[in-house]
Image (cartoon, rainbow, N blue to C red):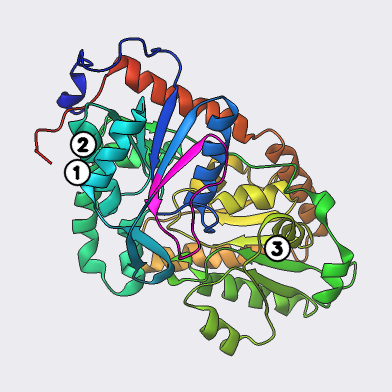
Amino acid sequence: MNTNSQLQVPTARPSTRPSSRLRRVCIVTETYRPEINGVANTLGHIVDGMVAQGIEVLVIRPKQGPQDQGDPTNGVETVLMPGLPIPGYGELRFGLPNGRRVRNALRRFDPDAVYVATEGPLGWVSARVARRLQINVVSGFHTNFHQYFSHYHLSLLTPLVYRYLRYFHNRTSATLAPTKALKQELSHFGFNHVQVMSRGVNAKLFSPQKRTEALRKQWGLKADELAVIYVGRLAAEKNLDLAVQAFNQMRSEDPRIKFILVGDGPLMARLKEDHPDYIFAGVQTGEALAQHYASADIFLFPSKTDTFGNVVLEAMASGLAVVSFDYAAAHQHIQHNHSGLLVSFEQPTHQDDDRASCEEEYVDAAQSLVHKPNLLKHVRQGARQHAESISWARIVEQFCQQLSNEVRDHGPTEESVVI
């Protein structure tokens, strides 16, 4: 642990603040609802859960557009920062590092702890300001940015980005990672005080009961025909070429199968041009998204870069057979051949033939569901049963406890750099 985190709470801080229960929490993030991604989804559930517990929340984030007026949720205060589009993610913005505005917001709100969810310029300056104000800072490792660069022909930058991430997180009192495997990986590479904060799923919203024959008819499917679905960003780092390869092999077994892609991204135009027979549903949210999940049968999750993959849990809750590499959410929640299909996961540092081998295994696993209807039925039932045991309420309680422990046991961190 950073030795600076051993400092005691200064007497200038209010002495009446309870040590066992949070009263006010500040969350700093580059992305937030209604933006659609795993980070925004997770933070939205965490904020809702804290508000339900009577905790006041301040969210510091970039302004998402001219109409953005902040979160209207009662109990949530929002400070909107100027931002610029993220290269390759035009719909998302990174916040500009205005330390003065952050400092004024934190002084006025006086939070028990600051949770920095993203490591961009806004996250960096917010963590630094909070340390200077003697407020405890906890960070989240939500995205494997260091792995993304290889998909955009910038592999030479990967070691530099990884070193930055390690430096950033080690200047906070704790780093919350979504899985035990990622915690072990980060700890192995020098990240200090890494803890696990998993993810939950709304099993009422995402349910097999949301299946609709009207939507399946719109897709051109009869009752006994299979729908394969992908939900997520249509981007290179999601390994979509493998999903395409797997689906094409599945269709060789049964030409009636349809492939539905839910989401948007830079690969949309190319995919539409190359595969005009695929169904592109665009971005879906809420009930419409739940209906798209439940009206399908098989969920392909080919990514090797997601730190977790909330969509895996949503698909399982919807009663789909998930095909995924054995890591992140799938490793933590899927039992092979019982609640999903797992494929050996090789790190990007392995040889090309190893990667080819595991991708062939992925295609074979997806194809097996077409000619093994009993396995498909069994896996879908097991997926739903497991998802019913995962709740966001439990995850929020864990998150609050982790913040409380850091405030009580380690006190605030101190920053020697004058802002």
Label 2–label 3 contact, CB within 8 A: no
Q: Which residue is mark 3?
A: 368
Q: Quadrant of the C terminus?
A: top left
Q: Which residue is mark 2?
A: 171
Q: Amino acid at mark 1?
A: Tyr
Q: Amino acid at mark 3?
A: Ser
In the picture, the disc for residue 42 is none
Label 1–label 2 contact, CB within 8 A: yes
> On screen, 376 above or below 257?
above
Residue at figure coordinates x 20%, y 12% from the top left = 11
- Outermost residue on the top side: it is 16
Could you tell me what secondary structure mostly forms the magenta stretch?
A: loop
> On screen, 320 above or below 11?
below
Q: Position of residue 55 (x, y in %)?
A: 50, 26
Disc 3 residue crowd, few under 14, some 14–19, many 20+, Cα 10 Å: some
> On screen, 203 above or below 323?
above
Residue 394 among those drawn in magenta: no
Q: Position of residue 404 (x, y in %)?
A: 40, 20
Q: Nearer the viewer, mark 3 or mark 1?
A: 1
SS of the residue at dot 2?
loop
Q: Nearer the viewer, residue 142 or 157?
A: 142
Label 2 and label 3: CA atoms lie apart by: 47 Å
Q: Amino acid at mark 2?
A: Arg
SS of the residue at dot 3?
helix
